[in-house]
Image (tube, rainbow, N blue to C red):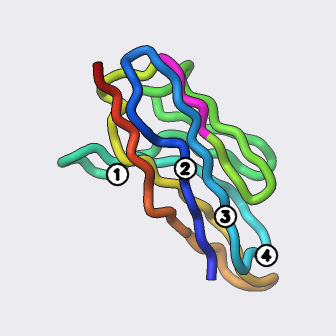
Amino acid sequence: QVQLVESGGGLVQPGGSLRLSCAASGSIFSINGMGWYRQAPGEQRELVATITMDGNTNYADPVKGRFTISRGKNAVYLQMSSLKFEDTAVYYCNADLRTRRWGPMEDYWGRGTQVTVSS
């Protein structure tokens, strides 16, 4: 069993900052990459940022220059700055990993953490 647990969401004013954390635990052999996605009410889930275990990053255009993704041991973080109303969403952690040496790469998701940008 693998669990991804997000934390750090909350209510913030426009222009403010938040830092999201995600810790992966359980039967993990290796992680290929981790990332953050978000889903606003009535919208589809969309990519925010991803990072490989080599440190290569990828950002969605709306967050470039404002958000920074980083990683730790079986963990991923998202530093969000200059937050806008349109950043309001549930943010989900994702990991692409193996649970055993010769097993397939599989996607795992956290349950999400709410980020609300409001004045």
Q: Residue at x 80, y 55 (%)?
A: 73
Query: Residue at label 1?
Result: 45
Q: Which residues are magenta?
A: 78-82
47 or 111: nearer the eye?
111
Point out the frontmost of discs 4 and 2: 2
Q: Position of residue 18 (x, y in %)?
A: 53, 30
72 or 97: nearer the eye?
72
The residue carrying pointer 3 sits among few (fewer than 14), some (14 to 19) or many (20 or more) residues within 10 Å by Cα, namely many
Q: Quick check: 108 left or right of 97? A: left
The residue carrying pointer 4 sits among few (fewer than 14), some (14 to 19) or many (20 or more) residues within 10 Å by Cα, namely few
Query: Residue at label 3?
Result: 24
Q: Which comes sooner in the sequence, label 2 or label 1? A: 2
The residue carrying pointer 2 sits among few (fewer than 14), some (14 to 19) or many (20 or more) residues within 10 Å by Cα, namely some
Corner quadrant of residue 106: bottom right
Residue type for callout 2: Ser
The quadrant of the picture occupied by the N terminus is bottom right
Considering only vertical position in the picture, is 111 above or below 91?
A: below
Query: Residue at label 2?
Result: 7
Point out the frontmost of discs 4 and 3: 3
Q: Which comes sooner in the sequence, label 4 or label 2? A: 2
Q: Residue at x 38, y 20 (%)?
A: 13
Q: Quick check: 2 left or right of 36? A: right
- Say what secondary structure mark 3 lies in: strand
Residue type for callout 1: Arg
Numbered label tally: 4
Cα gap from disc 4 to disc 1, whole angstroms: 27 Å
Q: Residue at x 61, y 53 (%)?
A: 22
Query: Residue at label 4?
Result: 29
The residue carrying pointer 1 sits among few (fewer than 14), some (14 to 19) or many (20 or more) residues within 10 Å by Cα, namely some
- Say what secondary structure mark 2 lies in: strand
Assess whether residue 61 is covered by the magenta stretch: no
Q: Quick check: 84 left or right of 76? A: left
